[in-house]
Amino acid sequence: MGGEAPEPRRLTRALSIGGGDGGWVPEEMLHLVMGFVEDPRDREAASLVCRRWHRIDALSRKHVTVPFCYAVSPARLLARFPRLESLAVKGKPRAAMYGLIPDDWGAYARPWVTELAAPLECLKALQLRRMVVTDDDLAELVRARGHMLQELKLDKCTGFSTDGLRLVARSCRSLRTLFLEECQIVDKGSEWIRELALSCPVLATLNFHMTELEVMPADLELLAKNCKSLISLKISDCDLSDLIGFFQFATSLEEFAGGAFNEQGDLAKYGNVKFPSRLCSLGLTFMGTNEMPIIFPFSAILKKLDLQYTFLTTEDHCQLIAKCPNLIVLAVRNVIGDRGLGVVADTCKKLQRLRIERGDDEGGVQEEQGGVSQVGLTAIAVGCRELEYIAAYVSDITNGALESIGTFCKKLYDFRLVLLDREERITDLPLDNGVRALLRGCPKLRRFALYLRPGGLSDVGLGYIGQCSGNIQYMLLGNVGETDDGLIRFALGCVNLRKLELRSCCFSERALALAMLHMPALRYAWVQGYKASQTGRDLMLMARPFWNLEFTPPNPDNARLVEDGEPCVDSQAQILAYYSLAGKRLDCPQSVVPLYPA
């Protein structure tokens, strides 16, 4: 008691991380703690602390998302994470969804399937997005992992047929999720659905929405009888009157999309359709005013509603949405109008995700005068304060509307706005101050897209984006800025930006190269529509180790035509730059010039 006070215990690096001669933190404890670290960037930081943490991260990592299939080789990923249970790989640039990337561009699944399928003994879930997957790939996958595979997601993929799906259904008896939405699949019959019903009794989610595959109602009815855990089904178009038996047996179903009203106006034909009692997510096709009452009996319990592929008018939207107070997710076209968005704002106080797609430019159901504008977006901002995601095509916009979103939508995580070119005059351009207010007011924002018209954002506004987007990791910008100086001011502030897409901008190759050098976290950039040269020589200014640079020259011969005569691949020059541990890719098509490494 009367002795000297003990020396204060210093928190050394060895003590804090369990280093030294074995450390004081048990191995089991580190494994448990690491299991609670889910954010990939936190995992990455933890793995850099010391060799021990690096090894534990490698052995305990259960899921990895490869943001670009050429960023790392499959073999290297396997060596780094040998116990993966779930893997997601993304292929072609997002521009492929808009016909801007040729079919032979690359992103083949074969190297990934060949290298990873057999050695990954723990692999239970695989997701491939915008990749070329063949029937042979699926055959090799199920031979190696069919007994273990519980989840297979092929998102917007091409190259396979229903023969491959039939093999998956027959071989993967533990399959719980099969996702095929927007895939281009060669239809060789619907036997694969019947095979699923007979071989996969634990199937819970099946999605082949927007695929144009043939559907046999008897197969779906068998699926409902045999798969008692089926909670989500999204199909290609099938007349709703043919699904009466399916709905009768699908007692656990909570989500359904794809049922169509192929004979509008004949409500008697659909009078016997009874949806399952647990259904809370719905998307119907070709639904018109006369068919809309079929939803009314259970509209109050709906949490997700997709009206993008209906024939509803603005007034129909108002009447239907007024009966859906518990919506969390809503997807519509801009036919909803400002008036419809006003109803959403007054009714849907729990709304978290709102998507407003563009309507039919060539006729069909027309939106009210002006479509969606600042009036509707302001109402949404004030009335729906739980919003985390907004994606909207608008005909008009003002700084004030953007400021309202920044003021009231504090939980916003993802914001995307496209300004259409229908109106000759936009009320309030440039949108510099509004964009700044939105970015400042939404601290949780991580994804940001802004596609405007010429004059929509000045160099000052582009600088504001750089200053106020320190937390944003993905950004798409179109028709923004005035000069190269604006781009440089933008780049100086984007310290955490990992993925950048630019379209229809006025910047030079030199400015683009310098801007990317100023963004330290950037891992991927795609640019189309800029002041391009024939060789891309100034792009070499950004050349550095582990940085791949691909250039598509502005050659009109690159443009191909689809059936209606519209260009499928734009003839403007493209740049693709990305961080890679795999080196130069070996499957570039002739239209792509690999600048670095040469």
Image (cartoon, rainbow, N blue to C red):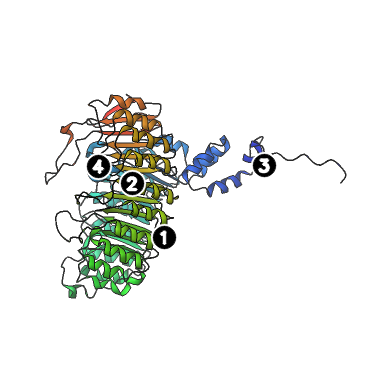
Tell me if 84 is positioned left or right of 243 in this view.
Answer: right
Q: Nearer the viewer, mark 2 or mark 4?
A: 4
Q: Nearer the viewer, mark 4 or mark 1?
A: 4
Distance between mark 3 and mark 2 Cα atoms? 47 Å
Q: Indicate the amino acid at tag 1.
A: Glu
The residue that disc 4 covers is 454
| Numbered disc 2: secondary structure | strand
Of residues 182 and 349, which is closer to you in this image?
349
Image marks 2 and 4: residues in contact by CB distance under 8 Å = no
Q: Nearer the viewer, mark 4 or mark 3?
A: 4
Instruction: Please give the name of the residue rendered at 36% of the width and 49% of the height, measured from the top-left corner.
Output: 434
Say which label, 3 or 2, has the lower sequence index. 3
Of residues 342 and 138, which is closer to you in this image?
342
Q: Within the image, what quadrant is residue 547 found in?
A: top left
Instruction: Please give the name of the residue rendered at 29% of the width and 51% of the height, measured from the top-left corner.
Output: 167
Q: Position of residue 112 (x, y in %)?
A: 35, 39
The residue that disc 1 covers is 386
Say which label, 1 or 2, has the lower sequence index. 1
- Is residue 127 among the parts visible in the rendering? no
In this picture, is 345 found above or below 598? Answer: below
Q: Position of residue 492 (x, y in %)?
A: 41, 35
Q: Indicate the amino acid at tag 4.
A: Pro
Q: Indicate the amino acid at tag 2.
A: Ala
The residue that disc 2 covers is 449
Of residues 134 and 319, which is closer to you in this image?
319
| Numbered disc 3: secondary structure | loop
Residue furthest out toward the right? 2
Image marks 1 and 3: residues in contact by CB distance under 8 Å = no
Say which label, 4 or 1, has the lower sequence index. 1
Badge 1 density bin: few <14, some 14–19, many ≥20, Cα 10 Å: some
The residue that disc 3 covers is 24
